[in-house]
Amino acid sequence: MDYIMEVMPSLISGMVVTLSVFFWTLVGSLPLGLIVSLGMMSRFKILQKILGIYVWLMRGTPLLLQLIFVFYGLPLLGTGIVLPRYEAALVAFILNYTAYFAEIFRGGLQSIDKGQYESAKVLRLSYWQTIRKVVAPQVIKIVIPSIGNEVINLVKDSSLVYVIGLGDLLRAGNVATSRDVTLVPLLLVGAMYLMMTAFFTYVLKKIEQHYSYWK
């Protein structure tokens, strides 16, 4: 018990970094994902192609590779871009998750029957009233389960920042394990990840229940 109390401060400090990466990735990638999805559905063919290639690249290559490229690769290309570890992690994560959220939002928007837009016009609803009162509630209900899966994946994927030396929860556990030659820190790390995923799963279920009235 004394040992657990001894290592907990460093693990909690690492968990703060993990949650910070998680939070800012969501803040950046959710709205960007919506914007990209709208761009992919626009009438501009060139924009569709560019965004389609972007989504294909982000979804077709490992997040770990993207993270290494942003932190180690950009300086080697002579771009003059040298990002600190934390900022590099956020850039890689936001770019990656934006692509996934874009596909989720696109699928949700495409599932809405075009007849509903025509009905809204008959009722003399403006474009934004149609989006807010007719389209948005249905899209939210449709995409919540898929977004929830990505949110839980993000909690676990955040451990990848360890490879660029960012002091997250996993790194804190590995340092303590190597120093003290015991698996206790890693077991605590596992328990803390389970607690985080359980909490966010609970929150997402509550959100899903909130929109379950919309049939």
Image (spheres, grey):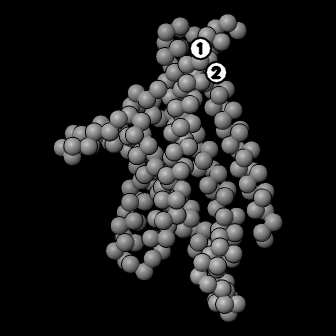
Question: Is disc 1 in contact with disc 2, using a CB cutoff of under 8 Å?
Answer: yes
Q: Mark 2: few, some, or many residues within 10 Å (few <14, many ≥20)?
A: some
Up-down: is 145 above or below 14? below
Q: Quadrant of the N terminus?
A: top right
Q: Amino acid at mark 1?
A: Val
Residue at image location 40% in from the left, 46% down from the top: 91
Q: Secondary structure at mark 2?
A: helix
Q: Amino acid at mark 2?
A: Leu
The picture places residue 103, in percent across and down from the top left corner, at 52, 62
Q: Is residue 14 visible?
A: yes
Which residue, given by chain and number where applicable, does mark 1 sit on? 7
Q: Earlier in the sequence, mark 1 or mark 2?
A: 1
Task: Tell me the quarter of the picture where residue 122 sits.
Answer: bottom right
Q: Is residue 63 visible?
A: no
Task: Tell me the quarter of the picture where residue 42 sits.
Answer: bottom left
**Is 167 positioned to the left or the right of 113 in the image?**
left
The picture places residue 4, in percent across and down from the top left corner, at 65, 12
Task: Tell me the quarter of the picture where residue 207 sits.
Answer: bottom right
**Number of numbered discs present?**
2
Depth check: give the residue in front, 39 or 52: 39
Q: Secondary structure at mark 1?
A: helix
Q: Quadrant of the C terminus?
A: bottom right
The picture places residue 198, in percent across and down from the top left corner, at 71, 38
Up-down: is 134 above or below 34? below
Up-down: is 192 above or below 140? above
Report how far apart the C-alphas of labels 1 and 2 lie in the structure.
Answer: 9 Å
Which residue, given by chain and number where applicable, does mark 2 sit on? 188
Residue at image location 77% in from the left, 69% down from the top: 214
